[in-house]
Image: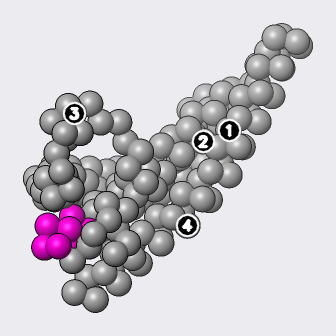
Amino acid sequence: MNSIKSLSRFIDNINEWVGRGTAWVTLGLVLVVFIDVVMRYLFNISFVFTQELEWHLFGFIFLIGAGYTLLHDGHVRVDIIYQRLGFKGRAWVNFCGVLLFLIPGCIMVITTSWQFAANSFSMLEGSPDPGGIPYRFIIKGCIPAGFTLLLLQGISLGLHSFLQILGIEKSEGGQS
């Protein structure tokens, strides 16, 4: 059981580290949007590069930060049943959800996006728009990378849930 806990803790630490780094990218996105708004409304100037940078940064934050969000249970839940369940009931829902939905969904996205990203990297794909970002392949590479981080965090959540079902872990945060 210690090896399961160690593996889960290792995955949690990876996504914690990645999430903290992604938070700084969020600050960068806020600055880029602020500059774009000021340039557009005060000087009536707009750049394709700035607009593309906004959605590249947003896509990066969304994709790479998904595992961190799962680690901290930050994904939206609209589930009146889950809220009313006890500790072990929630662990069962999480365990089954990870096995039946999260892991297969992540594997599907990773396997279908891998070649898409590899093709983009092989031709160093850039923006088709004049003045756009010449590195579009980077954001396309974030698709399989982000879903890999989400898959790893799903595995960790499944392991935590399994240990909770067995009564080995006593807290929902993963620490026993």
Which marked residue is nearer to the observer: mark 2 or mark 3?
3
Q: Nearer the viewer, residue 26 or 164?
A: 164
Which marked residue is nearer to the observer: mark 3 or mark 4?
3
Q: Please tell me the numbered disc located at residue 29.
A: 1
Q: Nearer the viewer, residue 38 or 102?
A: 102
Local crowd at mark 1 within 10 Å, few (<14), some, or many (≥20)? some
Question: Alpha-carbon distance for marks 1 and 4?
Answer: 19 Å
Q: Would residue 142 appear left or right of 98 to someone viewing this image?
A: right
Q: Mark 1 or mark 4, which has the lower sequence index?
A: 4
Q: Is residue 46 above or below residue 21?
A: above
Q: Secondary structure at mark 2?
A: helix
Based on the displayed image, in which of its 4 quarters is residue 35 positioned? top right
Q: Are marks 2 and 1 in contact (CB under 8 Å)?
A: yes
Across and down, in percent, residue 173 comes to 37, 62
Q: Nearer the viewer, residue 2 or 156?
A: 2
Please report the bounds of the magenta region as a residue range: 158-167
Q: Secondary structure at mark 1?
A: helix
Q: Please tell me the numbered disc located at residue 79.
A: 3
Q: Is residue 159 part of the magenta span, yes or no?
A: yes
Q: Is residue 123 part of the magenta span, yes or no?
A: no
Q: Mark 2 or mark 3, which has the lower sequence index?
A: 2
Provide the residue designation for mark 2.
Answer: 57
Provide the residue designation for mark 4.
Answer: 17
Q: Secondary structure at mark 3?
A: loop
Q: Secondary structure at mark 4?
A: helix
Question: Alpha-carbon distance for marks 1 and 3?
Answer: 32 Å
Across and down, in percent, residue 84 comes to 19, 39
Question: Alpha-carbon distance for marks 3 and 4?
Answer: 29 Å
Q: Are marks 1 and 3 in contact (CB under 8 Å)?
A: no
Question: Alpha-carbon distance for marks 2 and 1?
Answer: 6 Å
